[in-house]
Image (cartoon, rainbow, N blue to C red):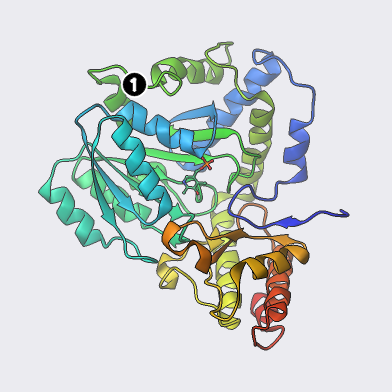
Amino acid sequence: MKGRKLLMIPGPIEFEPDVMQAMAIPTPSHVDPDFIETFGHALEMMREVWQSPSGQPFIIAGTGTLAMDMAGANLIESGDNALVISTGYFGERYAELLKRYGANVDILRAPLGEIVPLEQVESQLKKKEYKLMTFTHVDTSTAVLNDAKSLGALGRKYDVLTILDGVCSVAGEEIMQEEWGLDVVLTASQKAIGVPPGLALLVASPKAMQAFESRKSPVGNYYCDWTNWLPIMKAYESRTPSYFGTPAVNLIMALEVSLEKILKEGLEKRFNRHRLAGKAFRSAISALGLKMIPVNEAVSANTLSAPYYPEVVAGAELLKHISGEGVIVAGGLLPDIKGSYFRVGHMGAVNRNDLLATIGAIEAGLKNCNYSFEAGTGLKAILG
Ligand SMILES: *Cc1c(COP(=O)(O)O)cnc(C)c1O
């Protein structure tokens, strides 16, 4: 495609042509029987992708931040204690959000590039009673991968609701919501789910729904209130028309196609494909002599990477050259070190050709920035 650049940022990502095609038909009524079928089917498939057979799925027009907001608004009542385990930018966002609903928030912050040790989380849970805790599966500002399974187990042990911000991980990193005891797993359409921006997606466990139902005060956010949305999700799933706010009809048609593709590929295979892509990309970056924010392989995300610029290279200059080579990558996001690193998304439909094109563009950019390295070493690492 002439003039097209390869979009390798951590969302929006490159979308599959048949997902885009699903959006390009005349918009039907939101109560058209065919659309009701599509919506219902998408809800059912979410349970499978989330591996949460008894969970309650929600599909709402909005972004990932709305999904975070929805979990906070419905589960927090003023005066509740909440624990935020922060591995970067999005942990800090969650702490701010929960405070708006009157939560008393404690934050456990990981050192840059690391996760908070489980013993530290456990000793905090022993010290104080919390209603819920949140953690970011893959923090998109640091490319750090959290241990969602162990954190879910701690939540269960101490009877604390767990919210996983999976915006950069659902359908890319392994998640077994029910088995791991995660109460809310949330994401947005434009990341590893592979649908253009505009949908907030989450699945809530029976325990989370119980906590919502036993609230003493009304939800302090009208649009987010599950009281309004739960009957709508139930109606679509039982294939009956219903209305609260107009659903994002074309996006939901695209979501159905993307979820079908994810399940057809198979979750195990898909997670493994992401593991291999992440590993190959990191090995290429290391071969070029660049350091990355995550301190070791165990805490490195497979959906994106966050390499530091070499000291001799001006970041903005390098990004311009990479874009000139036809590949778009993202700059830094974490305020304190924003100018010292960049981010490359490798999730969803990403394949080896995309990784080769990206490393090729990075090599060309580094060469233009007078960084000295042996040309082709990154490409060789991708090729294995
Ligand atoms: C992108 C992202 C968000 C925010 O999603 P928006 O759709 O931009 O609102 C939240 N958390 C994580 C981990 C993300 O990667």
Q: Report the amino acid beneath label 1.
A: Gly
| Left or right: 274 in relation to 75 | right
* Closest to the observer, 158 or 224: 224
Residue at (27% x, 27% y) in the render: 211
* Closest to the observer, 349 or 133: 133
Q: Position of residue 172 (x, y in %)?
A: 54, 53
SS label for mark 1 = loop
Residue at (65% x, 87% y) in the render: 373
Residue 258, picture quadrant: top right
Residue at (20% x, 61% y) in the render: 119
Residue 68 appears anywhere in the view: yes
Residue at (60% x, 17% y) in the render: 246
Residue placed under numbered mark 1 in the picture: 220
Residue 323, picture quadrant: bottom right
| Left or right: 105 in relation to 37 | left
Q: Is residue 375 above or below residue 120?
A: below
